Image: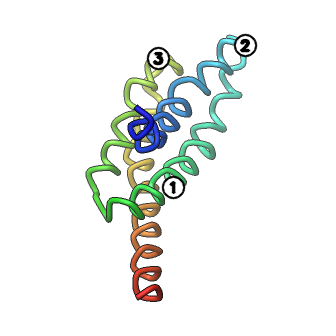
Amino acid sequence: MLHTLKTSWLYLVVAFLFYVAPGLVIWADPTAIGLAFPALLFLNPAMAIVVSVPYAYRHGFRPLFALLVGAVFMPAAYLAYHDALPLPYPPAYAGFSLIGLAVGWGVYRIAKRVGG
């Protein structure tokens, strides 16, 4: 059980930031949906990069993970934002995830070369 938690913490972070964080903002004040849009523009892209770096370091450059990060946002657009407006964002999040995957894979390759 502990091994499963150690390997799946990244997925828990993705789920929390995509589903729970915007929902909490909207739940606190339903009229303040404008406060959730900074999450679309800043929090989610940064989270896509931050989550993808350790994934790539551990598992290598896997573009399917970037597609998963982008696809996971699709239901969140309807659950938290109640609108089709955020639908252009998932491809962008997949792109940010690809950047994170490239950084993590590059760090792994450099560490492997330096470490022997």
Extreme residue in the front direction: 2
Q: Is residue 53 left or right of residue 17?
A: left
- Which residue is depicted at the point 37% across and 42% down? 70
- Tags 3 and 1 touching, CB below 8 Å: no
Where 51 sits versus 20, above or below? Answer: below
Q: How many numbered discs sit on the rendered protein?
A: 3
Secondary structure beneath dot 3 equals: helix
Label 3 Cα neighbours within 10 Å, binned few <14 / some 14-19 / many ≥20: few
**Circle 3 sits on which residue?**
79
Tell me if 108 is positioned left or right of 24 in this view. left
Q: Residue at x 37, y 47 (%)?
A: 91
Q: Position of residue 32 (x, y in %)?
A: 72, 19
Locate residue 28 relative to residue 7 in the image: left or right: right
Residue 67 drawn above or below residue 109: above
Which amino acid lies under the numbered mark 2 shown in the image of this protein? Ala
Disc 1 versus disc 2: distance between alpha carbons? Answer: 27 Å
Query: According to the image, label 2 marks what residue?
Result: 28
Position of the N terminus, as image quadrant, is top left
> Which residue was labeled with disc 1?
49
Q: Secondary structure at mark 2?
A: helix
**Residue type beneath disc 3:** Leu
Closer mark to the observer between disc 1 and disc 2: 1
Q: Position of residue 62 (x, y in %)?
A: 28, 59
* Element class at badge 1: helix
Q: Nearer the viewer, mark 3 or mark 1?
A: 1
Residue at image coords 68%, 21%: 25
Earlier along the polypeptide chain: callout 3 or callout 1? 1
Q: Position of residue 5 (x, y in %)?
A: 45, 36
Residue 85 or residue 60, whichever sits in front: 60
